[in-house]
Each structure stands twice: as structure tokens, then as C-alpha cells.
Image: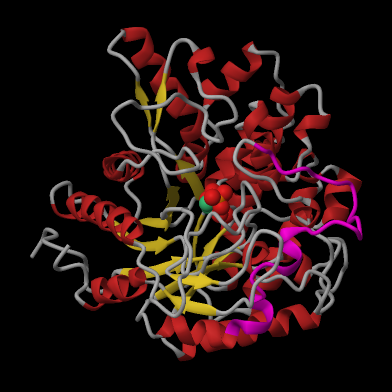
Amino acid sequence: SDYQTSFPQDFLWGCAIAAHQCEGAWNEGGKGVSTADIARLGGIGKVRQLDDKVDPDVRYPSHTGIDFYHRWPQDIEMLAHLGIKCLRLSIDWTRIYPTGMESKPNAEGLRYYHALIDTLLAHKIEPIITISHFEIPLVLAQSIGAWKNRAMIDYYLRYCKTLFNEFHGKVTRWLTFNEINHNENTTEAAMASAYRVSGIRYDQEYNIPQIAAQSSYYMMLATAEAVSLAHAIDPQNQVGCVLALHPSYAFDCQPETALKSLQCLENDLYIADTLCHGKFPDSKRRQLAKRGIQLDTKLEDDAKFQAGTLDFIAFNYYSSTVCMLDESQYPQGNHFKGGKNPRLPETEWGWQIDPTGLRYALNLMDRRYQLPILISENGIGMEEQLSGSELLDDAPRIAYLKAHLQALKQALTEDQVHCIGYCLWSCFDLISATTGEMRKRYGLIYVDQNDDGSGTLQRSYKKSAAWYAQVILENGELL
Ligand code: BG6
């Protein structure tokens, strides 16, 4: 038929992971030190401390991850049993270019990802690669200031070129950055997440608005150039860039609140506007100028933006937020900039649960950009305990996933949005990005490890794994 009545037959049911949260083996295989490798364990309301260098007496969660680097053959085997069609994974930049500045890539790092990708393909699981997911070579960050510096674009493109050439014919879907818009979320509570995206120590900067706008500009330009490069190397390549979306609802119906909530959304969407429309918005340039921010731009940048527009939209969705006129009402230490919605339940980490927000985000992106959409992450982090040999009953996760997939189905069938896939975060319990914790568990598969690193690392399916496998088998029919 000429309209959608269900999930498309080739819908990409999948899961998502990121290298620094699962691989471990931080100093094996010729890997360099990344910006993730100096982040200590944090917790609820406790921002992860960042060190200048690795302190041998400290345990850094990324150093061991969940030991995926050594266990991936069995791990992929477990995933294959679920029938997933795609796995979104990231490549760790420091496995390919340990300092970011070498002229030749590290062969051992490339071999590792070839083996991993070949195995996925053998299981008919499509690898979708995130090129930069919350880690950057620490040397680049400390010597040139990471994305503060225009020179970063060339280092990044060198790395991209290596990946596009190496995995030519094996990988066709790429994501340039994870949550690119969070680089500009520089409230005190969120500075650490901005650091994860761009490698910039905002806590050590004084002219934060200038640096945030400038570094986002460079990352957008790098994205546009990467798109052109990917297409030149293989016309089959499809490139996207991941946004973090958390729709901002007006707390009340005061017109001023509604306006503020619109502006809040626009602060994130101008990035997608630039990347999808191939032009840095004039209004944004003038807004910045009004705030005394002059961007370093070059005439030739405009043509690059125009030539390298995205092939598809990708976004991560966990929660919505509410916008209030009085920001002192915002809960302290909240990773998301915004207030609490009294109508929504929340997780133990204060992330509010809102399936309708996913449908809202899908509609918003579909209408605004008219490009295929990939939901690159969605899932719930919760505390869980295995008891003996029993299958872990994670009913709240199943309820969360079911409600979000129902909202997705409504977006497909009632709103007719064009969505090509759903990557569940995550297949495994892994290291939390914001807190470094293990106890914030996201997996369909339990991993026996505690925050202090103790545990057997043994994997076991939770009930949600069988549930998701069934959804995939039925192609979402019974949702
Ligand atoms: C997204 C990131 O922001 O949220 C993931 O892309 C991250 O890397 C996920 O793990 C969940 O956040 P957290 O902090 O609970 O792990």
C-alpha cells in the first residue's frame, strides 16, 4: 500500500553500544589514552572527576569496561540469538590513531574491528558505526584543545578516511558524532557531558559561550566534510549524525513559557538545520553576534556545508523535560537542562519516563527535515540484582520498551513518519556514560560486575531479551 500499516519489512531492529563503555583493554592492542580514560567513577549527583593523566592508583571504569575486547565472540553469539538486524557500535579513535596525530593508522586496531565487523556480517547483523562516541585521543585534547581548534577537523577527517577506506563494502551506515548538540549544554551539571562530546574542559575555560559555539561549528563542518568524503569513497555510504533529543514542554500555558520552550528546542535544532539544509542559519549567526560571539568562519566553509548534507537523521531519546520561566526551580545536578514534569514517573536516576515524547520527537524531526530517521538509542537504566541461577525478571524494562515501541508504532502508522530503525540501549549492562557506574544497568543481558570492578563478568539473559527477540520475530505486529 502507499501508506504504512505497521513496521516496514526491512525495519532495522537493533541494539547500541559504545567502545569506551564496553571494550576495556584500555592499553592493549596499541591503543592510546582517550579523554574517557581519565574519567573516574561518579554517581547520582556526583559528577565524574576528570584527571589530567592516568593515576596508577585509581580505578577508571573505561579501563576494563565489561571486557568486551576479549569476550566479543561470545557476546556477538548471544546477540545473534536475539535475531537483531543491526548493531550500532563505535570505533575508538585511539585504537586507530593512538594520539590522533600519527600519519599511519595502528594496524592492530584495524584488525580488531575487521574481525568484529566480519563476525557481525556473518550473523547478518548490520554494523552501524559511530565514528566519535564520547572519546577523543587525550593527546589531541591536551595539545591542541580538541574541538576548540580548527586543526581538529583535519585530524578527524584523516581518521574518517581510514575508516571509510578500510571498511569499504562492509559498512555503509555511519554516524559522525554522538549527541553533537550536548557540546553546548554547558550548565555546571552538564559540563562533563559537553566534555564527553568535544573533549573541551569547560570547567577550565572562562569564555564558555564563545568556545561552545565555535567548537560546535567545527564539529558541524567536520560532519559535512565527512559526508562528502564518505560519498566520494563509496556512493553506497549513508551518513548521519546523532542528536540527543529531549523535547522541552512548556510547564504552563503562559505565552512566555511557550516561547521559551520553543527557543530551548531551537538551541538544539539549529545544528540539525545546518547539517540537513547545508547552511549555517543566518539568524543564528546574528544571534551569536548580538551576544558578542564572532565565529571563525571561512568563505569556503559555506560550499562544504552545502555539499555535505546528511543522508538520514539519527537521535537518542531517553526523556522529555519541562521548560520553566524560573530556572531556579530546576532540580540541582540534573543532567538534562529543565524542570520536573509532575505528570511523569522517573527512574532512580531522575530521568523522566515519557513514551509520548518519543512520538513527539519523531514527528518533529520527520516534518522538519523529511529524511529517514534512525532511533540510535532508547532504553532504561535501573538497579538490578541477579538471584541465584534465576532469569532476571526486569519487568520495568519490558514495560518501558513496550510503551516506547508502541509510541513508535503510532508514529509510523498514525503519523506516517519515516523511521528506518530502532537501536535499543543496550544489549549489555555496561559502564554508564554520565556516572561511570555499573549499577545503572541498561542491558537485555546481565553482566556480573559491580562498581568497584568485582564480579565474574559472566553474561546472562534477562527476561527482556526473550521479549525483544519475540518483538523482532513478529516485526512489531503484536505491540
Ligand atoms: C546517551 C549516550 O547519552 O545516553 C550513551 O549516548 C549513554 O553513551 C546513554 O550511555 C545513557 O546514559 P548513561 O549516563 O545513563 O549511561
The spot of residue 298 in percent (x, y) is 72, 35
Kindly identify the residue that appears in the image at 46 percent across and 45 percent down: 276
Quarter holding residue 215: top right
Residue at far front of view: 388
The kind of secondary structure the magenta stretch mainly shows is loop
Q: Is residue 256 above or below residue 232?
A: above
Quarter holding residue 111: bottom right
Which quadrant is home to the C terminus? bottom left
Q: Is residue 236 above or below residue 138?
A: below
Residue 55 is inside the magenta segment: yes
Residue 270 left/right relative to 343: right
Residue 51 left/right relative to 223: right
Q: Is residue 305 above or below residue 335?
A: below
Residue 123 is inside the magenta segment: no
Residue at far bottom of view: 122
Residue range of the region highlighted in magenta in the rendering: 46-72
